[in-house]
Amino acid sequence: MADDKTIRENSHKSEKFCALLLFLATTAGTFLLCLFRGCQAVDILRDVILSGIGCFGVLFVMVQTDGGQLYWPRFTALYALCLLLAAACSYLPFAGWPFLTVFVLLSLFSNVLTGICAGGLLLSISTLLAGCGIEVFVLYFTCGLIGCGLFSRLRDKERFIAPVLLSVLFLFVGETACVVLYANETLKWELFLVPFVNAVLNIVLLLLLLKLFSNLIIYRYRNKYMEINDQECSLLVELKACSREEYYRAVHTAYFCGRIAGKLNLDADAAKAGGYYHRIGLLRGEINWQNTQELLEPYEFPPAAVRLLEEYLESGHSLKSKEAAVLLFSDTVIASIMGLLKQEPEKKIDYDRLIEEIFQKELRSSALARCDITMEELTGMRNTFQEEKLYYDFLH
């Protein structure tokens, strides 16, 4: 536990250092760019103050929406890179700015709200330094907003062709409205060349970005999840040898965790791992987070799975993440059905009524008081349990 406390303290120090770097890079970078461009003192003061306020807002959003899932050093490095790009954009014609990619990049490596705020801040710096009109900011901010939304579920669906094409199509149409329609010339095909080139540039940049994102995020833990979410994993084999009842409870819980999390567009791999290993502490005599953590460490579990198990076992069932809520209901339903079948094997169970009672009981408790799961998602989860009556025959 002491080591865990040390890790958390070091993590907090790293976050504070990264936050300071972000603020200094934004304000100092804006100041230097204004000096380099020969701006007047009043303009320099205005731009630095506005960039500082904007950066403070970005940091506030990052802290509020983090949830322990944002890797601050990596985001800080990517933000610094985008800040340099924003500085370069102030010297380029606005029709060629690749801010669609900037918005998507920052949102993929943080979250949608942080990506929108950080992208908007960098875009405002470029438009202020370049002296562009408000229409330029509206163009790229709107396209960035759409891009962040379209790519918001990339971790789960892993389908990127439609988001790339749609976001670039909106960019092309928007640039056409800002560039072609206001050109003081006869309408000719050459006027569409600049929006077309920028669209192609963003397609190339987005594809490179998605390749990077896939390597670092989507597929980074794919093999590890395949290993630990296999019923023949050595830890699960040990659990089976220790208690067949607990082993099958974990297997059936994992089935529903993966199925429901997939339907709700959650992290299905992490949820499934939570189902398999939330009872693994039994191998050390007691089911708690400390025993579970010690058993997981040699296997280098993915961070998302570790966070889920820690939340589920440490929170006293006062859960926050949706995956933890899925694990709670899956475990409770399976444990209840297995318990009833053990007591009265021949009795016919009214599964619909039992599942409804379980949901009502958990909703009346404080288990989901801090959870951001919606009633629509809870209804979908309950319907899935009630549709699986044939599966429960395997629990006999």
Image: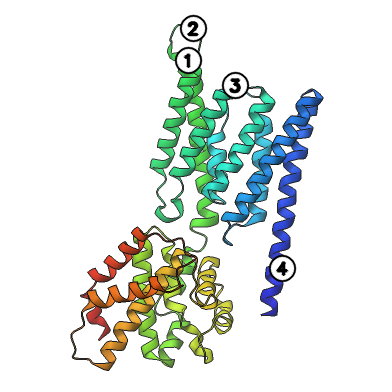
- Structural crowding at the residue carrying mark 3, measured as other residues with C-alpha within 10 Å and reported as few (<14), some (14–19) or many (≥20): few
Q: How much space separates mark 1 and mark 2, taking CA atoms?
A: 9 Å
Left or right relative to 169: residue 221: right
Q: Residues within 10 Å of mark 2 (few under 14, many from 20)?
A: few
Could you tell me how far apart the alpha carbons at marks 3 and 1 are, in whole angstroms? 20 Å
Circle 4 sits in a helix, a strand or a loop, which is it?
helix
Badge 1: residue crowd in 10 Å (few <14, some 14–19, many ≥20):
some
Q: Image point 74% across, 49% down: which residue?
A: 21
Mark 4 in CB contact with mark 2 (< 8 angstroms): no
Mark 3 highlights which residue?
133
Q: What residue is shown at x 53% (from left), y 36% (from top)?
A: 100
Between disc 1 and disc 2, whose residue precedes? 2
Q: Kindly check if marks 3 and 4 are in contact, taking CB atoms under 8 A apart as contact.
A: no
- Looking at the rendered structure, the secondary structure element under dot 3 is loop
Task: Tell me the residue at 52%/89% (across/down).
Answer: 286
Q: Position of residue 334 (x, y in %)?
A: 33, 80
Mark 3 / mark 1, whichever is N-terminal: 3
**Other-residue count near label 4 (Cα within 10 Å), few / some / many at <14 / 14–19 / ≥20:** few
Task: Relative to 230, say whether 12 is above or below.
Answer: above
Left or right placement of residue 13 versus residue 244 in this view: right
Name the mark nearer the viewer: 4 or 1: 4
Q: Are marks 1 and 2 in contact (CB under 8 Å)?
A: yes
Q: Which residue is identified by label 4? A: 9
Instruction: Say if 348 sits above or below 173 in the image.
Output: below
Q: Which residue is mark 1?
A: 191
